[in-house]
Image (spheres, grey):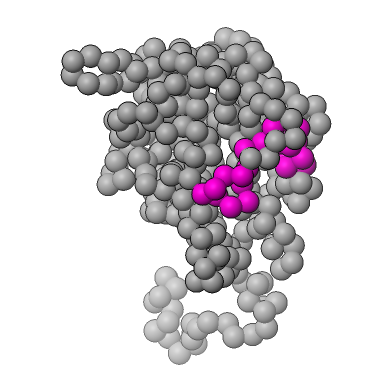
């Protein structure tokens, strides 16, 4: 007998509990925990560098030494994991910095694992930050325009993934949306002896308007064209499920939906359909909107942030990637 049918009988009078706050917390269906958070961080060469990102208040491009300080602060607050994005000094059309042995991400990973061995270090595996043109793959230009060479891009992505694993990364997160990249990375990792290094795939990554601040932070805005030919159409939900299914078949251990807040239906459907570990990325635009509205006094930053992240948990996300991770950890401690 369903809960709704029970309401027809005099013995059952469903209503909201109006008891003490402790009682309401006791029966709360969905909870946020700092153990579910991942903090994204941006690293570039230098020392004692904390370059503010104008469109993301409180977020910085960090030199490796400052990155360690920021990661230590997060870890001490209870945040168990960081997601590293690299900004190289030089870019080219082969994304050489993405797989260089002493690339900026590789340096950062080695330093983090040396200084904070218990911190879970996740690396973004993509080419856009390292390509001079800003696209996520190898570009071919002809009389018909510009296209991405998918298979050529897979080789570079696999090289980057192995180099991150060699540096000590705990979890690899390919974000490029090339076809077949999870299989290519899995095979390359296995071939290099990293059979136990897991993959968190950006499985359903949409061509979204909410990425603007990130592109300033990562210095990865395309010099021409856009990414709609390889990122997903925001109108397509069934396609998202197909993309997730393919990535799981190819060897993904965790799947991600990005962005998060405008795609709660996708998070829910992925969780219901596949019952696998599911991450949601609360992207830069979501973070910056709340920050901007709070600065104007239009929103309560704490309340709005907590409510938006709680919605991700309610939709089914097991892992929440958020720039507000440290702030939220403090708010949760305060109760």
Residue 236, horizontal then vertical, whole percent = 28, 44
Examine the structure image and report whether residue 66 is included in the region drawn in magenta: yes
Residue at horizontal 35 percent and vertical 40 percent from the top = 207
Residue at horizontal 55 percent and vertical 65 percent from the top = 295
Q: Residue furthest right?
A: 115
The answer to which of 144 and 49 lies nearer the viewer is: 49
The answer to which of 82 and 95 lies nearer the viewer is: 95
Examine the structure image and report whether residue 57 is included in the region drawn in magenta: yes
Can residue 78 be seen in the rendering of this structure? yes
Quarter of the image with the C terminus is bottom right
In the image, the segment drawn in magenta is: 52-72
The answer to which of 14 and 253 lies nearer the viewer is: 253
Q: Residue 234 occupies which quadrant of the picture?
A: top left
Residue 249, horizontal then vertical, whole percent = 43, 27
Residue at horizontal 45 percent and vertical 90 percent from the top = 10
Question: Is 209 positioned to the left or the right of 165 in the image?
Answer: left
Q: Residue furthest top?
A: 191
Residue 91, horizontal then vertical, whole percent = 50, 19
The answer to which of 105 and 267 lies nearer the viewer is: 105
């Amino acid at each position: 007998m369903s809960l709704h049918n029970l309401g027809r009988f005099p013995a059952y009078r469903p209503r909201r509990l109006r008891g003490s706050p402790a009682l309401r917390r006791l029966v709360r269906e969905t909870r946020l925990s700092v153990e579910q958070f991942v903090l994204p961080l941006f690293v570039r060469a230098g020392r004692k560098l904390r370059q503010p990102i104008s469109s993301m208040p409180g977020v910085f491009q960090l030199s490796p030494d400052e990155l360690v300080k920021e990661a230590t602060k997060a870890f001490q607050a209870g945040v168990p994991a960081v997601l590293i994005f690299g900004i190289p000094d030089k870019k080219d059309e082969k994304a050489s910095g993405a797989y260089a042995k002493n690339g900026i991400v590789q340096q950062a990973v080695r330093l983090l694992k040396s200084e904070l061995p218990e911190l879970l270090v996740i690396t973004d595996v993509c080419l856009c930050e390292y390509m001079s043109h800003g696209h996520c793959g190898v570009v071919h230009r002809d009389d018909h325009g510009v296209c991405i060479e998918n298979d050529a891009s897979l080789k570079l992505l696999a090289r980057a993934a192995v180099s991150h694993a060699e540096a000590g990364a705990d979890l690899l997160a390919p974000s490029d949306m090339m076809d077949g990249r999870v299989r290519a990375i899995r095979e390359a990792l296995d071939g290099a002896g990293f059979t136990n290094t897991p993959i968190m795939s950006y499985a359903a990554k949409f061509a979204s308007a909410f990425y603007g601040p990130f592109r300033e932070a990562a210095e990865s805005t395309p010099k021409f064209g856009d990414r709609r030919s390889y990122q997903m159409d925001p109108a397509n939900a069934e396609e998202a499920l197909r993309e997730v299914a393919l990535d799981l078949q190819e060897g993904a251990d965790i799947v991600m939906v990005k962005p998060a807040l405008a795609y709660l239906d996708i998070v829910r459907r992925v969780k219901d359909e596949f019952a696998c570990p599911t991450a949601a990325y609360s992207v830069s635009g979501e973070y910056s909107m709340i920050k901007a509205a709070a600065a104007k006094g239009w929103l309560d930053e704490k309340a709005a942030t907590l409510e938006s992240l709680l919605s991700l948990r309610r939709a089914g996300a097991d892992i929440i990637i958020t720039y507000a991770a440290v702030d939220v950890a403090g708010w949760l401690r305060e109760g």
